Image: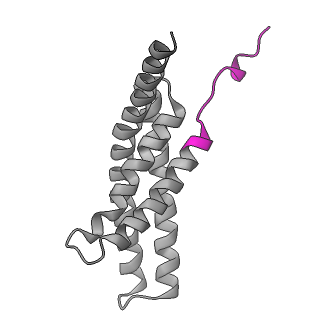
């Protein structure tokens, strides 16, 4: 009897972590570059878009596979950002009460999870489609 569980691959975590690292590094860099502009707070989204594209491109396959991995990348990135926020709040405590900080952090986590998952699913799928197009165009050139 054949082992059916070996055929099921849940996720390509190498692609997910590469996308999360790309999202965070490019998000921080673009935030620094946009520091003096009115769109300063949108720097992380530049990194998130490119990170989702990287994840989808690394996974390849269909649009759905890229979208699934993009969602995982978005969730992973949101959790990493939440941990960084908690550490920052511990180092530099805000003026508010502890309960207000916990409520604000939970609210920010929920919103970040939603936004990162949506953006990750859309652009992860686009990244997978880009890889399909690149493969098909390179096979035409090779022939």
* Span colored in magenta: 1-15
Q: Tell me where residue 38 sits by quadrant.
A: bottom left
Q: Is residue 76 visible?
A: no
Residue 16 higher or lower than 29, as above or below: above
Q: For residue 43, which quarter of the picture?
A: bottom left
* Majority secondary structure of magenta residues: loop
Spot occupied by residue 131 in the image (x, y as percentages of width and height): 45, 28
- Image coordinates for residue 32, horizontal then vertical, percent: 37, 73
Q: Residue at (70%, 16%) from the top-left corner?
A: 4
Give the side of residue 118 with respect to residue 52, left or right.
Answer: left
* Image vertical order of residue 116 relative to residue 92, above or below: above
Where in the figure is residue 7, as x and y percent of width and height? 67, 20
Q: Is residue 13 magenta?
A: yes
The residue at 53%/33% (across/down) is 59
60 to the left or right of 47: right
Instruction: Note whether 64 is above or below 25 in the view shown.
Output: above
Q: Which corner quadrant holds the N terminus?
A: top right
Q: Position of residue 102 (x, y in %)?
A: 42, 74
* Residue 115 can be seen, yes or no: yes
């Amino acid at each position: 009897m054949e082992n059916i569980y070996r055929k099921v691959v849940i996720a390509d975590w190498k692609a997910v972590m590469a996308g999360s690292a790309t999202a965070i590094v490019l998000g921080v860099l673009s935030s620094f570059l946009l520091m003096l502009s009115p769109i300063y707070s949108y720097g992380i989204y530049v990194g998130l878009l490119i990170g989702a594209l990287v994840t989808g491109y690394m996974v390849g396959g269909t649009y759905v596979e890229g979208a699934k991995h993009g969602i995982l990348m978005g969730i992973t990135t949101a959790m990493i950002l939440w941990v960084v926020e908690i550490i920052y709040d511990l180092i530099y405590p805000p003026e508010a009460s502890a309960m207000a900080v916990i409520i604000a952090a939970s609210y920010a986590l929920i919103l970040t999870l939603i936004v990162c998952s949506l953006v990750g699913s859309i652009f992860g799928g686009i990244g997978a489609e880009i890889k399909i197009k690149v493969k098909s165009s390179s096979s035409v050139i090779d022939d």
